[in-house]
Image (tube, rainbow, N blue to C red):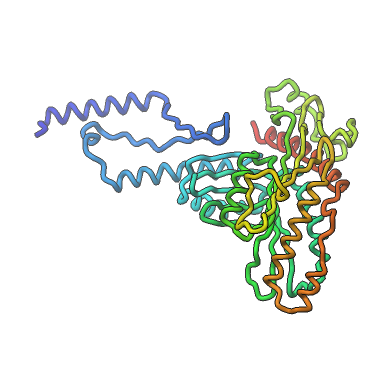
Amino acid sequence: MNTPTANSAVSRNWRRKVRSLLSSPLNCKVCHPVCPGRFFPFHPLWNPVPTAMAKRPRTRSAHRHRRNVTSRVRCKEIIRVISGVLQEYLVFEEVPFSDYTYIMDRLEEIGYKKTWNRLTYFPNSQRLVMSSPSAVHGFVLESIMTGLDRVLGTIAVPKTTLVFRTMTAKTIITDSIHAIPDLSIIMCTEGSRLGRLVCLMECAFSQSDCDVMRKLNTYVRDIPDLLVVGKILVKEAERYASPGSDSSVAPQLRSSDTMTGEEWGHDQGADEFHRVVVDGHTWFSLSSVEIHVWTRQAGRSEIEIDHSDGGEYAVGTLYPTVNLGDINRIFQRGLQLIKEDTFRELVDQSLLDRMAAWSPPPYVLDSTSLRDALVFGAWTTAYERYLCWRSELKSKP
């Protein structure tokens, strides 16, 4: 039994401890990894408990309440980072599914889907990845999509019966992944409500190659109808870093007016896209561009993406040399698989005859168009980085 004297002593000790804590800086910062070499800080709610109360066992509901409050604090910090200044690539580890759904609901409320940023979530590993597709990423993909659209448009079957839709914003939701692939082809037939996904492609530039391969492996495992998957691997010669506010070139850049698109890189030739240096700072540097494509092997239930040999896989280059011969051949094979797959959907004999008479052309991708897209995308990506840096400067006091 506690005596009044003992209770008074506990109270005095407690008040002394509180005064001591309040007079010292709060140093219980918790850091969460965002991406290699960076940390995502947040402050958990700290609630001091008197000594006498601390000895009491906490109830399960108290533990759950504290965990939920801390989780919401972290979710709000993640939302603030994602919806703030554009980041090319961020990774958040240990994000429970309940936190992911909370984050997506809040982002929906603030109109986040209107931005360029894309989120990929892996429920099993609780990994949330954010990437911001760049111009070099988008223009090359658009050129590939145009080539595929052109070829699929030559199929002599009425659009009311069979149509192929190429998309850049198709949401994929399976037990293992929630994502928006960079390029999707959906085969829609008369009477079908959703269509079937037959081709997917991703671009490894704002995303890491490791994350892209993880996504492709998950796609082929969870979507058995896939016939073709691919990736575009854009490698920079050196990791991009903005000038910051303290670098040697920052004062010169800050003192000048924001350049217009016409002024940007006016002292460099258009062919110098592989290394864009303006006012002494490197805004873009290109090492290589590769295109990798896998197709399903006859008799297999899914694409074997771990195999890089045989006739079901090909790689081509767009920079520093242009070599798309094998890529055009593998795309021709993929289109042949799509053609064979349509026979399961068509019923009318005249339409089956038309489909049987159609053959995919030997050249799906146009090297000149792809090269032009790469040049334009490189210069535009460099300029977007410059504008983003200028915007950050203006936001600072």
Q: Is residue 369 left or right of residue 208?
A: right
123 shown above or below 10 = below
Image coordinates for residue 195, horizontal then vertical, percent: 65, 67
Image quadrant holding the N terminus, namely top left
Closest to the observer: 67 or 120?
Answer: 120
Number of numbered discs visible in the structure rendering:
0
- Is residue 143 visible to us here? no
> Who's the residue at 66% across and 75% down the image?
191
- Residue 340 position by quadrant: bottom right
Q: Is residue 46 left or right of residue 364?
A: left
User: Is 14 situated above or below 161?
Assistant: above
> Whole-percent x and y of residue 23?
37, 24
Q: Position of residue 348 (x, y in %)?
A: 73, 79
Picture coordinates of residue 253 (x, y %)? 77, 27
| Residue 160 to residue 197: above or below | below
Looking at the rendered image, the quarter that the C terminus falls into is top right
Query: Extreme top residue here?
Result: 248
Q: Is residue 178 left or right of residue 311?
A: left
What residue lies at 71% left-to-right and 58% top-to-bottom? Answer: 167
| Depth check, front residue: 284 or 243 | 284
Rendered residue at 69%/50% (across/down)? 294
- Residue at x 17%, y 29% (from the top left corner): 8
